[in-house]
Amino acid sequence: MFFESNEVGLHKVTYVMDETPQSLSFIVSGKDDVDLVQVGDSLRRTEIPTFDNPLNFSEICTRFDPCPYHYVAIEEALSNSLPTILLVSTPGFARQVSADLL
């Protein structure tokens, strides 16, 4: 589903799933009312841990063989002409991993 609205405020979407009506309420805020990076905005200056500068993290990658994604600092990545993807994760959304998966 794609939704686009210029109307700030409370909205409600109603839909049918498995023959059961469902509804979802959500709030649309003005771009200036939220402190989030929006599509088309420049990325805020931030530091990310790298193998050369781990920023006090004891572990920055869970792969057994160090992956190539932790050798380039974000400022270096943004200053070259190559596409850059930044994945952001927080401990608040992390799940415990079973020992047999490690």
Image (cartoon, rainbow, N blue to C red):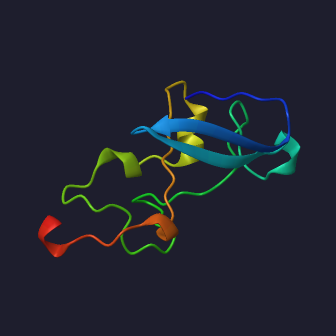
Q: Nearer the viewer, residue 32 or 82?
A: 32
Q: Nearer the viewer, residue 42 or 95?
A: 95
* Position of residue 26 in the picture relative to residue 56 (left or right): right
Q: Nearer the viewer, residue 80 or 101?
A: 101
Q: From what the image shows, is residue 52 above or below residue 56? A: above
| Residue 92 percent across, percent down from the top left | 51, 70
Q: Nearer the viewer, residue 73 or 83?
A: 83
Residue drawn 33% across the image and 61% down it: 61
Q: From what the image shows, is residue 49 above or below residue 55? A: above
| Residue 19 percent across, percent down from the top left | 42, 37
Residue drawn 40% across the image and 49% down it: 71
| Residue 87 percent across, percent down from the top left | 48, 47
Residue 95: quadrant of the picture = bottom left
* Position of residue 44 in the picture relative to residue 17 (left or right): right
Residue drawn 55% across the image and 46% down it: 74
Q: Which residue is at the far left?
A: 100
Quarter of the image where the N terminus is located? top right
Quarter of the image where the C terminus is located? bottom left
Q: From what the image shows, is residue 63 above or below residue 73? A: below
| Residue 46 percent across, percent down from the top left | 64, 55
Residue drawn 51% across the image and 44% down it: 86
Residue 62: quadrant of the picture = bottom left
- Disc tally is 0
Residue 15: quadrant of the picture = top right
